[in-house]
Image (cartoon, rainbow, N blue to C red):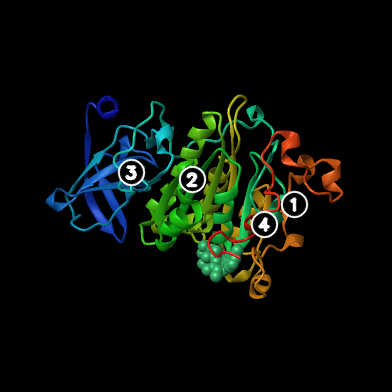
């Protein structure tokens, strides 16, 4: 396998390299001169800093005759006259079945000390387009979320996209981890975007456990990483989910949180000089959100689906703040967690009346719509809703 990896890496190497020169540095923005005509927004460059340190960067805009690049790392040692190498390929990853059970960083590199990752044969662009709307399958077939309150009141279908909306500390991450542990999905792709580093280990050891990890891929970019890294981790999460969807799997894609993705895009937008609109979020944030979230959903005929669950940090508990409002308008339902319910010690603090699953009417039968219990699993040949197992209703991390 190592030889295969080497052969395919060599095959992908560029036959020539173009160089530009650094002509300005302002904050996190690097201006490159000389090659702007060979570049377009989203292209990759590698800045060669003093001491031969290589800093990957992405083109985020143009100003006059200069290309503006933002680095994926720190700019230590980068000065006027440094070289910038232009990559000949689009940013793509080569996911592989063996990525299951692994933890990867924003660049698709392994960060779990389990050795190199195998590369697959098919390239998945990080900023892939969603499948054409008219060729997509319809959202169909229930998915067991493993949490009774959700299964009963906010039933979700395979290929549906839901948001978990709550203020800080109300229980979004814990609810997400409950779902990751108990869901019936074939594969789980989890993107921890811009959140706490501590939560990564908690997620792996306490929430997923060895069994859960074996069917999961974790993509991690913690809050201390540069905005480009955080944004790219969100794209990468969807690209990995798309790979498994194309393998015919029903994928559950969990992202904690899409607000941090929006914040990363805001940082990038403001650095390039975009005008701040509501709450400082720039127009590109509202363009990027649907591009990201639409990638989840049912696949083409013959492939699987990506059921998406995205957490949204509702700033100041104001459910009409711009990101909550925009995301709610894009997704197929919202699960609202309420601080007042959490304060009473009732978890998960779902406010059923304020939450909606927009495809629920189509996925329940008449008996279930009248309020009957979901039918026993075996009758449909599907996995059930957890029977009487009390653990299904309680936090796996915190116990009864
Ligand atoms: N299901 C639960 N059972 C018991 N306690 C819970 C549950 N969910 C959340 N909590 C309590 O709420 C705290 C915060 O939860 P969590 O980290 O999930 O919040 P969050 O909404 O993700 O916050 P942030 O926006 O800051 O990331 C937990 O540490 C725990 O004390
Ligand atoms: Mg959280």
Query: Around disc 4, counting alpha carbons within 10 Å, would you say few (fewer than 14), some (14 to 19), or many (20 or more)?
Result: many
Closer to the N terminus: mark 1 or mark 3? 3
Q: Closer to us: mark 1 or mark 3? A: 1
Q: Which residue is mark 1?
A: 152
Closer to the N terminus: mark 2 or mark 4? 2
Q: Alpha-carbon distance for marks 2 and 4?
A: 27 Å
| Pointers 2 and 3 in contact (C-beta within 8 Å) | no
Q: Is residue 215 above or below residue 68?
A: above
Looking at the image, which residue is at 29% across and 25% down?
4
The quarter of the picture where residue 377 lies is: top right
Instruction: Answer left or right for 13 relative to 216.
Output: left
Q: Secondary structure at mark 1?
A: helix
Closer to the N terminus: mark 1 or mark 2? 1
Q: Alpha-carbon distance for marks 4 and 3?
A: 33 Å
**Viewer-proximal residue among 233 and 33:** 233
Q: Alpha-carbon distance for marks 4 and 1?
A: 13 Å
Q: Which residue is mark 2?
A: 211
Q: Alpha-carbon distance for marks 1 and 3?
A: 39 Å
Q: Which residue is mark 4?
A: 335
């Amino acid at each position: 396998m190592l030889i295969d990896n080497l052969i395919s890496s060599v095959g992908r190497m560029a036959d020539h390299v173009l160089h530009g020169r650094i002509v300005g540095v302002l904050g996190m923005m690097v201006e490159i001169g000389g090659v702007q005509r060979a570049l377009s927004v989203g292209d990759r460059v590698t800045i060669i800093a003093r001491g031969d340190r290589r800093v990957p960067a992405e083109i985020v805009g143009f100003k006059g005759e200069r290309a503006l690049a933002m680095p994926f790392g720190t700019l230590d040692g980068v000065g006027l006259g440094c070289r910038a190498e232009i990559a000949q390929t689009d940013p793509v990853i080569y996911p592989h079945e063996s990525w299951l059970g692994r933890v990867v960083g924003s660049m698709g590199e392994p960060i779990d000390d389990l050795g190199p990752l195998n590369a697959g044969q098919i390239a998945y662009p990080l900023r892939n387009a969603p499948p054409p709307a008219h060729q997509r399958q319809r959202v169909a077939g229930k998915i067991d979320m493993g949490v009774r309150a959700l299964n009963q009141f906010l039933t979700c279908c395979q290929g549906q996209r839901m948001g978990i909306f709550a203020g800080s500390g109300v229980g979004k991450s814990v609810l997400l981890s409950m779902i990751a542990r108990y869901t019936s999905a074939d594969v789980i792709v989890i993107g921890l975007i811009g959140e706490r580093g501590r939560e990564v280990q908690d997620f792996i050891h306490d929430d997923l456990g060895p069994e859960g990890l074996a069917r999961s891929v974790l993509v991690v970019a913690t809050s201390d990483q540069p905005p480009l890294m955080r944004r790219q981790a969100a794209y990468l999460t969807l690209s990995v989910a798309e790979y498994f969807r194309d393998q015919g799997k029903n994928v559950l894609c969990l992202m904690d949180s899409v607000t941090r993705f929006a914040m990363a895009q805001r940082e990038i937008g403001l650095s390039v000089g975009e005008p701040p609109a509501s709450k400082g979020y720039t127009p590109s944030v509202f363009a990027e959100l649907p591009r990201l979230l639409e990638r989840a959903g049912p696949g083409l005929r013959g492939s699987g689906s990506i059921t998406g669950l995205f957490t949204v940090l509702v700033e100041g508990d104001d459910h009409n703040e711009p990101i909550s409002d925009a995301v709610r308008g894009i997704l197929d339902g919202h699960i609202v967690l309420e601080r007042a319910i959490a304060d009473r010690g009732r978890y998960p603090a779902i406010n059923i009346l304020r939450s909606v699953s927009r495809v629920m009417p189509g996925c329940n039968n008449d008996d279930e719509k009248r309020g009957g219990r979901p039918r026993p699993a075996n009758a449909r040949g599907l996995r059930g809703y957890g029977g009487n197992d009390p653990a299904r209703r309680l936090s796996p991390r915190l116990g009864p």
